[in-house]
Amino acid sequence: MGDFDCPKIRNICILAHVDHGKTTLADHLIASYGGGVLHPKQAGRLRFMDYLDEEQRRAITMKSSSISLQYKDHSINLIDSPGHMDFCGEVSTAARLSDGALVLVDAVEGVHIQTHAVLRQAWIEKLTPCLVLNKMDRLICELKLSPMEAYNRLQRIVHEVNSIMSAYKSEKYLSDVDSILAGPSGEVGDENLEFIEDDEEDTFQPHKGNVAFVCALDGWGFSVTEFAGFYASKLGASSAALLKALWGPRYFNPKTKMIVGKKAMGGGSKARPMFVQFVLEPLWQVYQAALEADGGKAVLEKVIKSFNLSIPPRELQNKDPKAVLQSVMSRWLPLSDTILSMVVKRMPDPIAAQSLRITRLIPKREVISDRIVSEVLAEAELVRKSVELCDSSPEAPCVAFVSKMFAVPSKMLPQKGVNGELVNNSTDDNESDECFLAFARIFSGVLCSGQRIFVLSALYDPLKAESMQKHVQEAELHSLYLMMGQGLKPVASAKAGNVVAIRGLGQHILKSATLSSTKNCWPFSSMVFQVSPTLKVAIEPTDPADMVALMKGLRLLNHADPFVEVTVSSRGEHVLAAAGEVHLERCIKDLKERFAKVSLEVSPPLVSYKETIEDEAFHPLDYLKFLSGSSYHIERTTPNGRCVVQVQVVKLPPALTKVLDDSSDVLGGIVGGKSGHTSDKSLETQRTSIVEDDNPVEVLKKRIRDAIDSDMPAGIADMDKEKWQIVWERLLKRIWALGPRQVGPNILLTPDYKGKTTDCSVLVQGSPQVSERLGFVGVCSNGDLASEASSLATHSLYQEAETLENSVVSGFQLASAAGPLCEEPMWGLAFVVEAYISPLIGQLNGSETPHQQPEQYGILTGQVMTTVKDACRTAVLQKKPRLVEALYFCELNTPTEHLGPMYAVLARRRARVLKEEMQEGSPLFTVHAYVPVAESFGFADELRRWTSGASSALLVFSHWEALSEDPFFVPKTEEELEEFGDGSSVPPNTARKLIDAVRRRKGLPVEEKVVQHATKQRTLARKV
C-alpha cells in the first residue's frame, strides 16, 4: 500500500436516497478498475458490494463497505453506503472516513427525504460533494419526455440540490456572524472569515465539472466536459467557451456561428438551449434508433464511425435492442471513466482535504495553559498539525480513527499473509466463529501490523491523564487488511490517507475510537447521527437455559452494529433498540443465525410515551399567580405529621420544552459539572451549526430566551409583553433542578420564601443551582436566611430543613420519571414544591426524649421524598392530565390510481396528512403525513399490500405531541349526555386505550370490567 503517495489517493463515498442506484454505479466502477474481481457483463446485476444474503434478498444495502480501485495512476478508496433511513448510522461512519461524496439523485424521482439527510451529513463532515443525476434512460423510455422537457427537469433538480446546500451555507454564515458579534470587538480571525469565499456561488454547476449525467444500469454517463471536447473542433470554438455555454440559457446561432443569449436569437424562433441541441438530442436519436422497430441503424453506425468505437459484430447483431444500445453507449460514453475522472479532478486528495476538515475532526480547544500541561499541549498541538498536513512520513505521530467495528466469520479471514506464508487466525477469546475488524482511516503517520498503539475514547482528555485511565487502553494490532468488498487483502503497513481494516482491537473498542501512537493527543470529535434508535423490543430465549448464549449474542451484536442499543430495563428485560423495522428484523436475524444461535421470543414493540397536562392559555397573569403561590395547590402531610408539602404545577411553553429536551446532552455537561470540552462536544453533536469554540452556556441561554420569546401569546398588548418577559426572568432565576435524571424537560422551582413561614414551621428553601450553572443568577449563599430562620425557630430545625433539600429534589425526580397515568416520564411541566417542617412535639415542650415517634414511620428524609412524589403526581392528575405520543414524519410516493387505498391505510393508522403534491412530469403523488409511532409497526408492509407494491414510505422521527383527548372523559354537558348517555356505555377513547395497554404491560392495575354480561347462558336443549 506504499505504492501511492497522498496526492494520488482519493477517499470517496456514494450517498443517496434508497433505490437511486448507488450499488449499481459501484458495480460499474469495480468492473472497470477493480482489478478483475467483477466481469463487466455482470456489472449492475450482481450488486458486488451487497454481499450479505439479506441485502441480496431485499435488494437494498444495509452496511457501508469499502473497496480499492486503481484508476490510471490513482488509488481510489470507494465506500458504498446504505440509502434506507434505518441504516443512516452507516452513512455517518462512511462519511467520517471519506474526503469526498458522490451524491446520487434519481432523474425521475428527484430529491427525497434521505437526499436531504445525506447532503446534511456531507456538509457536517465537510466533504467535497459531486452531483450524479442517475437513471437518465427513464426520462426517454418511461416518461417519454422530449429533450427540452428533460432539460427543464434536470435543471430543476440541480437547482433544488443547490438550494439545499445554500440553506446549509447560510445557516453556517449566520452562526458565524453571531459568534463574531458575541465575541470581543475587533477579534475577527481568519477562521471567522472562512465563509465569505464561496457563498454567492452555487455548489453544483455542470460547467465546473462537478455534475454528471448517467445511466448506471446501461453503463454510460457523461459530464459537460466530454461534449465540450467533442464539439470544440467541429464548431470552431474553444472547449473552455463551450464548457460554459453547454448549460444554461445559451444558444448557438448557425448563421453567424456564434454563442448568444436568448434575446439575440429573437423571440419568435424555436431556439433550443445548446445543452438540448448538442447533448440531449443526439442521445435521444441514438435511443430511438436502437429501441424503435422502424428506427434506422444509420444513426448507430454514424456514432460508431465518428468516435472509432470498437464493438464486436456479434454484439451489434444481437436480437435484443437493449443489448445493442448498451454496447454502443457504454463504449461511446463509458460510465466509470466519467465518474472517476470527475473524482480525480474535483475531489481533494487527503492532504488538501484534512487541512479543510481539521476544524471538524479535532476542534481547537481553548485551554488555560500552565507549566505542567504546556509540554502535553505542545505535543497534542504537534499531533493536530500532522493530522492537518496528512504527514505520511514514518517519523510522524501515527493517528487513525475507527468509525465502526464489523464482524467477519473467522473462516473468511485470509489464510495467507503478506508474503504468502500461512497465518494462524485463531483468536485468544472463545468467540472463535466471529472475528471483529475495525473499519479505520489513517490520518497521520504509518500504521504497521504488530505495532502497539493507544486506543482513546471520545471522552479522553490528555491534560488529565491520571483521572483518564479508563478512557485509554494500549493494544497491539494483529494485522492490517485492504478491503475489497467482502474480500480482505493482507498488507504489512499503510500510510496516512488510506482506509484499512484492522484486526486485534475487538477487545478494546465498542463502537468507535481514536488510535494514536502517543497518549498526548486529543480524541476525534464524535460522529453525528441523523436519527436515534426509537424502536424497542424486549428479547428472551424460548428455552431459559439459553440465557447465557443470548447475553453473549447481544454483546456481540452491540459490538458489530454501530447503531443498535442493548440495555436492561428496570423490570430486568433485555431491550434491543433499533432505528426502524428493517433494521430490527436484520438484528433479530443476526442474533438467531450468527451471534446467539438460539431460538428467540420477541415482544411487541415497546412504545415510549410522556405525560403532561392540558395546554392552558399562556397569559402573564397565570404565571404571576403561579409565582406568587396564589394558584390552586395540592397539600400532603408526611405519615408522622411533621412535614406539610404543598405542590403547584403549570405547563411550560412548547418551544422551551423542546429546547430543554434537545439540549439534554449539553445540560448534562453543564449541570453535572463536567469539564468544558466534554459539553462542547455534546453541544457539537446536538447542534452542528454552532462554531466549535463557542461557549455552550451562552448558546443555551440564548436558545432558552429565544424559545420563551417565540412562545409569547399572539395579540397581547405591549404592556403584557413586558410583563411576560419580567415574569420569565424571575422564573429562570429560580430553577432548582431539572428532571427526570437531572436533564429532562421538567423544571423544579425554588419556593418563594418571602413571608411564607408560619408560626413555628420552617420552609425547605432550596437553592437555584441550575440557574447558577446556566448563569441566570449569580452564585449566592443562604447565610442571611439562616440567621433570619434562627430567630423564628431553633437553629437545629433550620439545619434539618437544609438536609431535607435533597429529599425534595429526589421526590421531584421520582415523580417526573414516572407520571400518574401509566408511569411514563413527564413532559414540559414546572413544579413549585413548598415543604414546611415543624418541630417535634417534645422540642416544643422542651423535653429531651422525642425519639420514639419518627422511628415508627421510618426515616424522615424517606417520608418527605415519598410525600413530594405523591403530591406532584396528584397535582398533575388534578390539572387535566394528557398523554404525549411520539410522531414519525412520513413521506409517501404513490401512483395516482393507488391514492384511495393509501389514504385508507393512513386513516386506519391515525395519520395526519400535511400536504400532497403531484411530481411534475411523472405519474407519482408525494404525500407528507405525521404517523404515530405506536401505529407505525407493519405500516410499510400494509401499504405495499393494499397498493400492490406501488407505494413506498419512509418514516423518520419528527416530534412529540399531546393527545387532545381526555383519558378520564365523563359526559357532563347536555350535548354529551345526549350523545353518550349517563357515561356507562362510553367507549374508551384512544388515549385511554393506549394508557391501559401500557399499564397492562407494566403490570399496573387497570380499571376494566372482567365480566361484560353477567347473565347465565340459557340453552334451548333440555339436557341439563
Image (spheres, rainbow, N blue to C red):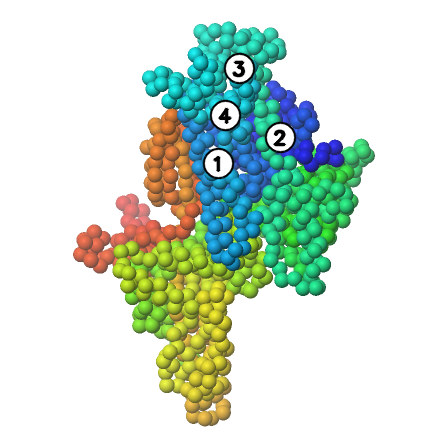
Residue shown at 53% from the left, 52% from the top: 188
Residue shown at 77% from the left, 43% from the top: 394
Residue holding disc 2: 344
Of circles 1 and 3, the one toward us is: 3
Secondary structure state at the residue bearing disc 4: helix
Frontmost residue, 492 versus 5 = 5
10 Å crowding of disc 4: few (<14), some (14-19), many (20+): some
Amino acid beneath label 1: Glu
Q: Quadrant of residue 633?
A: bottom left
Amino acid beneath label 3: Gly
Q: Position of residue 454 (x, y in %)?
A: 71, 51
Q: Quadrant of residue 647?
A: bottom left
Q: Are marks 4 and 3 in contact (CB under 8 Å)?
A: no
Rendered position, 962 above or below 301: below
Q: Are marks 3 and 2 in contact (CB under 8 Å)?
A: no
Residue 719 visible? The answer is: yes
Residue holding disc 4: 244
Between the residue at mark 1 and the residue at mark 4, the CA separation in whole angstroms equals 15 Å
User: Which of the marked residues, 3 or 2, is nearer the chain's N terminus?
Assistant: 3
User: Which of the marked residues, 1 or 2, is nearer the chain's N terminus?
Assistant: 1
Q: Are marks 2 and 4 in contact (CB under 8 Å)?
A: no
Secondary structure state at the residue bearing disc 1: loop
Residue holding disc 3: 236
Q: Quadrant of residue 612?
A: bottom left
Residue shown at 43% from the left, 16% from the top: 253
Frontmost residue, 445 versus 486 = 445
User: Which of the marked residues, 4 or 3, is nearer the chain's N terminus?
Assistant: 3
